[in-house]
Amino acid sequence: MYIKNTLFLCVVILFSIQLSAQVVGGSNEKLAKLYNTGKYESCLYKADSYTYKEDYSSDPEPYLYISMCLYELSKSDDPEIQDDYKDAIKQAIKFVGKFAKKDRHNEYYPLNLEYINTIKKFQKAKIKEAFNAENYKKAASAAKVYNQLNQETDYMVLYYTGMNQVMSNNISIGKKNMTDSRFKIKADLRASKLKIDKTIKSAIVDGFMKYTEQLINNNKLEDAKKVIGLAKDIFPNDGFIKVQYNVIHK
């Protein structure tokens, strides 16, 4: 009896794990079944067909399934699938953005953060790659896409976008984004409700470091003090920010 109960428990656990792979909180059983049985292309086509139906025009669930299927297809070792889905990750990122926009009532987004954060890491890698290559225009564009993966504007990401825009000579728009973001960040700090997206934190720190370095090199010390002061308020325990703050204030 003990062995039978143990086997039954194992089956239940494995079944539960399998089910957790689908859209959490979702109600579309057809898409869930296709996804959970590994029929990612069929699930992708079916989910895409829903997005054209009037009854599903405001339903965010198919958009998330499209993204999840594309992500799974991107991991395939099949050469034909690899060839057919060369841009799978790029499209998976795009459809998370569409999903976030569609989920107006915050019904699915909080329940599927594990997957969303996985996709965010891919977009962060694009940001870092452009930033490290000193292609600040491309870094700003990638950061804008990253912010579209959120349900609400992340003002730290917007501030980072602004710094990159200024460094790529898109000065007026960049400074506006920085000014607007600074106001909101300061308000959230005063209210002790500033949320830090851990996925993008290191990129934002890099942005503060590079931007203040450029300000110093351009003899704009007061501007550098203002920017690094904000960085220190946001990341009081970050070693790189502390060092840069001390250098600027020596």
Image (cartoon, helix red, strand yellow):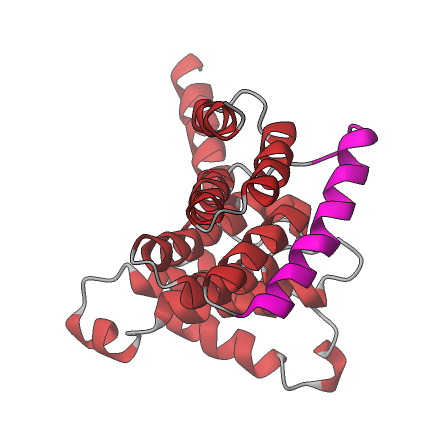
User: Vertically, is 229 above or below 47?
Assistant: above
Please report the residue visible at 74 percent of the width from the left and 85 percent of the height from the top: 54
Residue 34 can be seen in this image:
no
Q: Which SS type dominates the magenta stretch? A: helix
Q: Position of residue 135 (x, y in %)?
A: 36, 63
Horizontal side of residue 242 vs 126, given as left or right: right
Q: Position of residue 205 (x, y in %)?
A: 48, 38
**73, 178: nearer the viewer:** 178
Q: Which residues are magenta?
A: 170-194
Where residue 150 sits, quadrant-wise, is bottom right
Q: Position of residue 83 (x, y in %)?
A: 22, 77
Residue 187 can be seen in this image:
yes
**95, 179: nearer the viewer:** 179
Where residue 153 sits, quadrant-wise, is bottom right
Please report the residue visible at 53 percent of the width from the left and 36 percent of the height from the top: 198
**235, 17: nearer the viewer:** 235
